[in-house]
Image: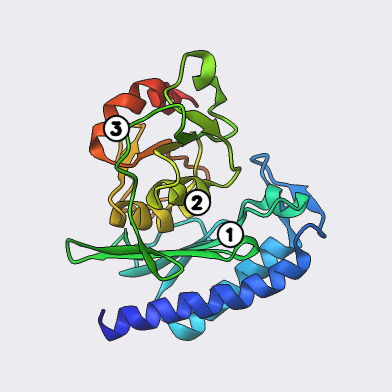
């Protein structure tokens, strides 16, 4: 790992640890308000967003930032962070201990580093993917890889709240719903589940885990006829969703994609 990426990793680790420590004090104790898209936001989200953006400005002054709570437009910067200060705000407000801080770093519009810290369960995932090489994915600094197993009713597949209609037909795995996009997808990366689907994830939900999943050997499938990355200069990503299927390996794409492909056609 070169000096720059060592700096990036240390920065993400120190920043999320600091932010996470304070968020644990607010966990289950704050009131939420509803945004225009129906999702929840708290003062803790806004505080964490501001703290992370200020930390990036101090450490990497030439880098841009996209954030769920602030800037939504990609202006074409060579380096750009995409952050979600609390992924899983509903869980956070209700005292459910699965929520995390997500930070992805883009180079020329495509993620090359992902870092997601889940304070309540002491799990931190990160990965690098640059120079055309997969450079490994890690959980608490230990290497992880997707599962080699075949689907069965003793294996898991994760849905989001907006994709439960897939259960109108028989499904080859047990279903779980975690309520957090990033954890849905890193569960595939770590081998906990064989796949997962999210019908309305935004760019800050997926930038970091896009790297982690693929570096761990998983497959990212867009359910729309468009690539997510690279981001397009001048594009406002505030209202754009990217229906996504993730699976543990290529052989599972034809197993699961026909069951969830229709989610890509939803408005």
Classify residue 119 by image quadrant.
bottom right
Q: Residue at x 44, y 34 (%)?
A: 155
Mark linked to residue 154: none
Q: Horizontal and vertical percent for residue 121? A: 61, 61
The nearer-to-camera label among 3 and 2 is 3
Q: Is residue 197 rendered to the left or right of residue 52?
A: left
Q: Is residue 251 rendered to the left or right of residue 115?
A: left
Q: Residue at x 66, y 44 (%)?
A: 39
In three-dimensional space, the C-alpha distance between marks 3 and 1, rounded to whole angstroms, equals: 27 Å
Determine which residue is flagged by label 3: 252
Q: Residue at x 43, y 67 (%)?
A: 81
- Tell me which numbered mark, 3 or 1, is placed earlier along the sequence: 1
Question: 84 and 146: which one is in front?
Answer: 146
Task: Describe the element under mark 1 as helix, strand or loop.
Answer: strand
Task: Describe the element under mark 2 as helix, strand or loop.
Answer: helix
In three-dimensional space, the C-alpha distance between marks 1 and 2, rounded to whole angstroms, equals: 8 Å
Question: 192 and 51: which one is in front?
Answer: 192
Q: Is residue 28 rendered to the left or right of residue 156?
A: right
Q: Horizontal and vertical percent for residue 55? A: 54, 80
Q: Are marks 3 and 2 in contact (CB under 8 Å)?
A: no
Q: For label 2, count other residues whose C-alpha is less than 10 Å away and answer few (under 14), some (14-19) or many (20+).
A: many
Above or below, comparing residue 204 to residue 220 in the picture: below
Determine which residue is flagged by label 2: 182
Question: 39 and 160: which one is in front?
Answer: 160
Q: Are marks 3 and 1 in contact (CB under 8 Å)?
A: no
- Tell me which numbered mark, 1 or 2, is placed earlier along the sequence: 1
Q: Is residue 75 rendered to the left or right of residue 92?
A: left
In three-dimensional space, the C-alpha distance between marks 3 and 2, rounded to whole angstroms, equals: 20 Å
Q: Residue at x 46, y 27 (%)?
A: 153
The nearer-to-camera label among 3 and 1 is 3
Determine which residue is flagged by label 1: 100
Q: Horizontal and vertical percent for residue 31? A: 82, 54
């Amino acid at each position: 790992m070169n000096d720059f990426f060592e700096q990036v990793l240390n920065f993400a680790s120190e920043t999320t640890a600091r932010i996470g420590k304070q968020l644990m004090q607010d966990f289950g104790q704050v009131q939420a308000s509803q945004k225009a898209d129906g999702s929840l936001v708290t003062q803790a989200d806004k505080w964490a967003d501001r703290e992370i953006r200020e930390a990036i400005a101090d450490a990497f002054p030439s880098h841009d930032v996209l954030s769920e709570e602030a800037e939504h437009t990609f202006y074409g910067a060579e380096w750009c962070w995409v952050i979600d200060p609390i992924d899983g705000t509903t869980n956070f407000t209700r005292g459910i201990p699965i929520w995390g801080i997500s930070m992805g770093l883009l180079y020329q519009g495509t993620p090359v580093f992902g870092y997601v810290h889940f304070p309540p369960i002491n799990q931190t995932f990160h990965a690098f993917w640059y120079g055309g090489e997969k450079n490994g994915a890690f959980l608490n600094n230990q290497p992880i890889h997707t599962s080699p197993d075949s689907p069965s009713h003793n294996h898991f597949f994760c849905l989001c709240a907006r994709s439960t209609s897939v259960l109108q037909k028989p499904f080859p795995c047990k279903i779980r719903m975690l309520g957090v996009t990033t954890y849905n997808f890193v569960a595939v990366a770590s081998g906990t589940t064989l796949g997962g689907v999210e019908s309305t994830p935004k760019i800050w939900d997926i930038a970091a885990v896009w790297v982690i999943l693929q570096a761990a050997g998983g497959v990212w499938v867009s359910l729309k006829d468009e690539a997510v990355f690279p981001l397009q200069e001048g594009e406002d990503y505030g209202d754009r969703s990217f229906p996504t299927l993730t699976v543990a390996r290529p052989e599972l794409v034809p197993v699961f994609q026909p069951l969830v492909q229709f989610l890509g056609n939803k408005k």
